[in-house]
Image (spheres, grey):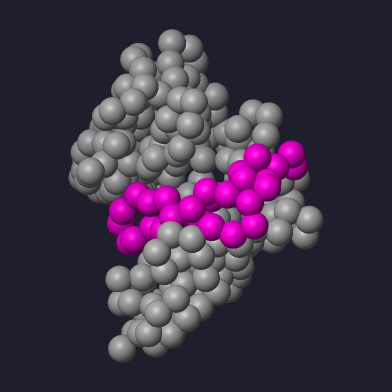
Amino acid sequence: GAVVSQHPSWVICKSGTSVKIECRSLDFQATTMFWYRQFPKQSLMLMATSNEGSKATYEQGVEKDKFLINHASLTLSTLTVTSAHPEDSSFYICSAPRVYTGELFFGEGSRLTVL
Amino acid sequence: KNQVEQSPQSLIILEGKNCTLQCNYTVSPFSNLRWYKQDTGRGPVSLTIMTFSENTKSNGRYTATLDADTKQSSLHITASQLSDSASYICVVTTGTASKLTFGTGTRLQVTL
């Protein structure tokens, strides 16, 4: 079964609204989680690294105020797309490395469609 | 600049045939190299992970090779099945900050 769970798996929202996506590590603690965006037929693009108990680290070109990341516990990170616009429509995926082993597990992804 | 390049970009093969996907990287310092399979609309699933000292690693019909000297890796798929149709992504990890560098992926289509 999945060891990293994302919710929701898909969401449709109106332009201007905010959408929150959750990423949970199910049977291990993750002090770090990664958030990616993937456009059709392209590879994953790292957006940010969320760190439990501290601020996320954003990749160049990713707007911090647009994509709010919170990593409040060792098993949960959230990505909030604020004031979403159609160009934010994409596939968002999270991943979490298992502490000590370094194995990297990906969530199933969340498909966001902004109308 | 750390880069991971994969080839071919896309590939179509007949069911039952073998194929080999390539991954070249310039990441330094090298920590490990992973191959993932990503079905359309799903998250990537790990196939293999290889460290500096490993040359070959198999997972069922998937066999990955690593040449750390030439900074090349390959993923060989034996006796392909329709369910192998997916994108295959090569990911290299740097040794210090555990930063991941993703390849652009190879889209494989297995047909009858």
Question: How would you classify the magenta stretch by its main secondary structure?
Answer: strand
Judge from the rendering whether residue B24 lies leftward or rightward of residue B100; answer left or right. Answer: right
Q: Quadrant of the N terminus of chain B?
A: top right
B70 and A95: which is toward the camera: B70
- Give coordinates of residue B102: x percent, y percent: 56, 50
Up-down relation of residue A13 to residue B83 (above or below):
above
- Give coordinates of residue B5: x percent, y percent: 64, 60
B48 and A111: which is toward the camera: B48
Q: Is residue B41 magenta?
A: yes
Count numbered badges in the picture.
Answer: 0
- Give coordinates of residue A6: x percent, y percent: 27, 37
Judge from the rendering whether residue A67 lies leftward or rightward of residue B91; answer left or right. Answer: left
A22 and B37: which is toward the camera: B37
Determine the residue positioned at 38% across, 51% down.
B45
The answer to whether residue B19 of the structure is visible from this angle is: yes
A49 and B37: which is toward the camera: B37
> Seen from this angle, which residue lies furthest top?
A53
Judge from the rendering whether residue A110 lies leftward or rightward of residue B60; answer left or right. Answer: left
Determine the residue positioned at 78% across, 56% down.
B69
Q: Quadrant of the C terminus of chain B?
A: bottom left
Determine the residue positioned at 40% across, 24% down.
A30
- Please identify the quarter of the rendering in which residue A25 is found: top left
Up-down relation of residue B31 to residue A101 (above or below):
below
Up-down relation of residue A4 to residue A100 (above or below):
below
Residue interval drawn in magenta = B28-57
- Give coordinates of residue A59: x percent, y percent: 57, 33
Q: Is residue A47 magenta?
A: no
Determine the residue positioned at 68% across, 29% down.
B96
